[in-house]
């Protein structure tokens, strides 16, 4: 009796079909992850290119305004007046601040008459003493409520510190860090915070003051923090935005753990800035922007992007959407999503949506299944049982990795760890998954967070 397989034509057909299926499988598994010619994910290439924002340089804006970029995590600026200079923000490390102060003095040897803190974050306030020679003569100006938002004495300080280190990649090998989204990958650790001096003038809504012959207008403007202010210098048409503006989608929520940042008011603060005839827009991080038309457009886009995320979140919430459904639906309008200064190098839209949602209604998102959910361990046990046991689950993880479905693979590995399954392979897979997720990330904090978790697993084993 002759079987089909003994027919050479049939054999060729079978081999051909098998080859086609294999090629299809390969194509399908590669489809999800785009790569550049150098084998790198385009997001990674883009994030690397963004590092040019942090090349150390003293940038001259006209003849009287200078901004130091890239010497530490944030910017410090100097305004030169008739008989003195004004410093806006003072970096984080005293060592870095001393270097910048020296460079500023090479430009102008006039004494510092005032220091302005745009807000209380440590990366803007830690190096103040480096700029000052005669402390008693210097005005140190901030908003009323300065530093109130900080969680320095939080009952969860320990976890905040751990998450801060992950977000900024503080414990990662230098070679693994690209940048921090709005700061260089590595910043000075030379006497961090040791130059801090308290403000000696504070104000509530606004303050008009003349320092060294320069008219300054300071305005309270809640946003990234609730002690944020911006400085308008009419004479030089320069606006110092603090951390309410930088060249990245705003960090409406910080994954290191932050209190609610009032998203709606943040958007409104930015639109308020756009009403000034700004020729030089100086962000708290990243390089300044020049040109009236462009600066105006940047501010309007930024404000509209923030308010769009807010309005959409509220809209979907009112339709009864759950938290995840709301996250799934809110998108930046295409026109804004394409703007170079709204790329998600630092903040991310979904994080902002979650933050707004939880701020409005608290943890319960309305879904009955979320009222009294199973314990993590119970759910994990059910899932593992459903797929046919731990080894089967391992296989599912492997399959998900092969298909580059890394978020799913990570979630499945959660289940195994949750029930205490400690096969070496789970840890190996999880490390690989976290590194793969990092390798595709445009967002620097997310990338640093994934990598930090991978390194923690490597060192803990
Ligand atoms: Zn900052």
Image (cartoon, grey):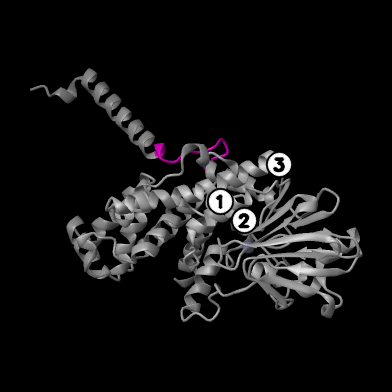
> In this orientation, does residue 40 appear?
no
Residue 294, percent across and down?
A: 67, 40
**Residue that badge 1 annotates:** 345
Which type of secondary structure does the marked residue at label 2 adopt?
loop
Residue 39 among those drawn in magenta: yes
Residue 128, percent across and down?
A: 75, 72
Residue 427, percent across and down?
A: 39, 63
Q: Is residue 118 above or below residue 42?
A: below
Q: Which mark is residue 292?
A: 3
**Residue that badge 2 annotates:** 182
Query: Are there few (<14), some (14-19), or many (20+) residues within 10 Å of tag 3?
Result: some
Quarter holding the N terminus is top left
- Whether residue 260 sits left or right of residue 183 in the image: it is left
x 21%, y 69%: residue: 372
| Among numbered discs 2 and 3, the one appearing first in the sequence | 2
Q: Is residue 22 above or below residue 261?
A: above
| Residue bounds of the magenta highlight | 30-41
Quarter holding the C terminus is bottom left
Which type of secondary structure does the marked residue at label 3 adopt?
helix
> In this orientation, does residue 308 appear?
yes
């Amino acid at each position: 009796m002759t079987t089909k397989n003994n027919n050479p034509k049939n054999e060729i057909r079978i081999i051909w079909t098998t080859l086609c299926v294999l090629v299809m499988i390969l194509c399908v598994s590669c489809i999800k992850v785009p790569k550049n010619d150098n084998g790198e994910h385009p997001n990674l290439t883009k994030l690397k290119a963004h590092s040019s924002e942090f090349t150390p340089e003293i940038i001259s804006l006209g003849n009287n305004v200078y901004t130091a970029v890239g010497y530490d995590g944030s910017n410090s600026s100097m305004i030169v007046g008739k008989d003195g200079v004004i410093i806006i923000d003072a970096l984080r490390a005293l060592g870095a601040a001393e270097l910048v102060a020296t460079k500023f003095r090479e430009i102008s040897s006039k004494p510092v008459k005032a220091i302005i803190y745009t807000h209380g974050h440590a990366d803007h306030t830690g190096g103040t003493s480096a700029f000052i020679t005669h402390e008693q003569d210097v005005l140190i100006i901030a908003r009323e409520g300065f530093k109130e938002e900080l969680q320095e004495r939080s009952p969860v300080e320990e976890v905040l510190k751990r998450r801060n280190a992950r977000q900024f990649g503080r414990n990662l090998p230098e070679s693994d860090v690209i940048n921090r989204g709005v700061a260089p990958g590595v910043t000075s650790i030379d006497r961090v915070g040791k130059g801090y001096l308290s403000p000696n003038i504070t104000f509530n809504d606004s303050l008009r003051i003349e320092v060294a012959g320069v008219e300054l207008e300071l305005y309270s403007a809640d946003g990234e923090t609730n002690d944020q202010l911006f400085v308008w210098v009419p004479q030089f048409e320069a606006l110092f935005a603090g951390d309410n503006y930088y060249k990245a989608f705003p960090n409406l929520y910080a994954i290191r753990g932050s209190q609610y940042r009032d998203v709606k008011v943040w958007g409104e603060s930015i639109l308020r800035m756009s009403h000034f005839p700004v020729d030089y827009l100086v962000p708290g991080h990243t390089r300044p922007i020049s040109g009236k038309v462009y600066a105006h457009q940047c501010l309007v886009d930024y404000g509209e992007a923030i308010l769009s995320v807010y309005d959409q979140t509220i809209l979907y919430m009112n339709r009864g959407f759950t938290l995840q459904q709301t996250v799934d639906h809110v998108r930046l309008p295409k026109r804004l999503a394409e703007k170079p200064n709204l790329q998600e190098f630092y903040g991310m839209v979904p994080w902002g949506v979650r933050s707004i949602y939880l701020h409005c209604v608290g943890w319960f998102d309305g879904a009955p299944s979320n009222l009294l959910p199973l314990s993590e361990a119970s759910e994990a046990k059910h899932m593992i049982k459903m797929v046919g046991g731990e080894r089967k689950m391992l296989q599912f993880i492997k399959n998900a990795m092969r298909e580059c479905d890394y978020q799913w693979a990570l979630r499945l590995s959660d289940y195994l760890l949750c029930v205490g399954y400690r096969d070496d392979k789970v840890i190996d897979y999880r490390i690989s998954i976290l590194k793969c997720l990092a390798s595709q990330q445009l967002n620097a904090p997310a990338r640093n967070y994934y990598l930090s978790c991978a390194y923690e697993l490597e060192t803990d084993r």
